[in-house]
Each structure stands twice: as structure tokens, then as C-alpha cells.
Amino acid sequence: METETETFYAANRLIYLSLIYSSGSRRAMVPYSAEMTELIQRFQAKDTFRRLVEAGLKAMQLRLLALEDGGLRLSARRSESFFAATLTDYGRLLARSDLRAAEILPVHCAIATAFFPTESDLDAPVEDLGAIVMADVIDILRRFAQAEANLPEDESRLHPQVKSVAERLRLLPEDNPDRQRAGSGNSWVGLIGRVLDHMVDTGYLLAFEETAGDPEYRPTPAYQTALREGIVYSFHAFRDIVKEAQVQEETTATDGAMEEVQDVPTQ
């Protein structure tokens, strides 16, 4: 019969392995696949073990986003938590230690806006949200960059650091033909590609490629939960500005169409 100490060890072992799993490091998880399978089965079958794991997660300020075959999908409860990834950490995960907040933040906000353009989308079944492609994210980034440049100087919705983000974004090229070459510099396409790939590796997105070279992405419940429960002010401000820009574009297009109709001579 297992002792209390052994049960405690197993619960913490599951948390430890799930942190590795949630980082997206598939190679690091290979030696532990059998052990993880056994721990996950135990987590599902035994209420006492599950409660012990949940207590451990709470003590470490971790949130359980989803229970998956490969492990528990975990995230930090707050940005100041020990296990919360810093921008420097995130840059290393993307294999680019030189990435700045000004290059990462708008990409994540654009991806989130593409999947969750309205508040109700955060509560909708993920299977009803559809798929996006990279072009959708680029379109949103372009709209945000242009709209932010036209905001009045006393605009209070955006933190000064976020305004610097938009300024930096406008300086980057949308694409760089040499982006695969080391030292070629960042571009929108390169940044979006790295972020999307990492979100797939960490289980936040699912990738499908019906047409070769043109992958589509769908959100997972873990990603939706992370956004709904850990939503940040920057995302709200970003989405609102994009939405206003879209409304303005549609209004301008409608007004232009009406003027054309009015200019048509009557027979």
C-alpha cells in the first residue's frame, strides 16, 4: 500500500512533468511518456489524488487550462507568478533571444483578435469559432498599425509602452525574403510564423494543412480558457482599436458607394 509521502511525491511529479509538457518541449517529454500516462490515468480515476494535485497547483499559483492525453496543460495564474514566462524567456523559446516586447505583444493580440473578435467568442464553443490563416493576422496587424498612427495624442486607452509597440511595428517590413537566414532581421511574417508554431507546440492552437504551404489554425479550449481567465488590458485596447478601424473602413466604403450611385446620370 502506498504511503502518504509516496502519494505526495506522485502528485508533485505530475505537476513537474506537466510544466515540461506545457512548455512545448516534445523532446524533453519523450523519456517520461509512460510515467505521464500512468499519472494522468491516476488523476482521472482517483478523487483524492486529483485534489492533492489541485492543491499543489494552487500553492504554486498555477492554473489548469486543460486535461490532455499528454499531460496537464498549465499556465501561471498571474504575470508576477514565479512560473510566468518573461519576454526574455519567451524569446528563447522562439529561438530568438533578441525579440522585444514591441515585436511579440502585437502579434499575440492580433492572433487573439482573429479568433475572438467579440467578447462573446470567449465563451462560445471552440469548434464554432472557425479557423484562421496567417493572412488574417497580417490584416489585423496592418489595421492596428494604421489606426494607432491616427489616434489623437491624448488617447488614454493605450499605455505609453503599447504606443511604442505600434511605432516599432510600423518600422518592421511585412515580409523579408531572407527571413530564414540568420541575422536577416524580423518581419511580420517571420514573427507571426514563430509565434503560431510555438502556440501549436504548447497546445494552444491546432494546425491543419489542407493546401500544401498554407496552414490553417484553430483554437483549443486551453487557449480560450487562458484568454478568458487571464485576459489582459492590452488585448482589450488592441481589439477595440481594430474594431473601430474596421467600422471606419466599412463606413467610408459605404459612403463612397453611395456617392457613385448618386453620380450616375439618369436616363
Image (spheres, rainbow, N blue to C red):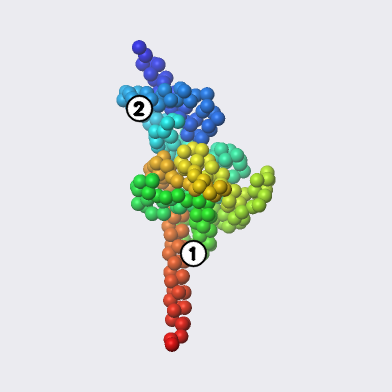
**How dense is the environment of label 1, judged by Cα within 10 Å: few (below 14), some, or many (20 and up)?**
few
Above or below — where is 39 with respect to 202? Answer: above
Q: Which quadrant, please, contains the C terminus?
A: bottom left
Q: Among all residues in the image, which is located at the extreme bottom?
A: 267
Where residue 155 sits in the image (x, y, percent)? Answer: 46, 60
Q: Secondary structure at mark 2?
A: helix
C-beta proximity under 8 Å, tags 1 and 2: no
Report the disc number at residue 152: 1
Which residue type does callout 1 highlight?
Answer: Pro
Residue at 53% from the left image edge and 44% from the top image edge: 195
Where residue 263 sits in the image (x, y, percent)? Answer: 46, 82
How many numbered marks have been drawn onto this rendered protein structure?
Answer: 2
Q: Secondary structure at mark 1?
A: loop
Which residue type does callout 2 highlight?
Answer: Gln
Residue at 45% from the left image edge and 62% from the top image edge: 246
Q: Nearer the viewer, mark 1 or mark 2?
A: 2
The residue identified by callout 2 is 44
Where residue 131 sits in the image (x, y, percent)? Answer: 45, 49
Is residue 209 among what the camera can see?
yes
Above or below — where is 88 with respect to 27? Answer: below
**How dense is the environment of label 2, judged by Cα within 10 Å: few (below 14), some, or many (20 and up)?**
few
Residue at 45% from the left image edge and 25% from the top image edge: 36
Where residue 27 sits in the image (x, y, percent)? Answer: 55, 30
Report the disc number at residue 111: none
Residue at 58% from the left image edge and 38% from the top image edge: 92
Residue 79 or residue 127, whichever sits in front: 127
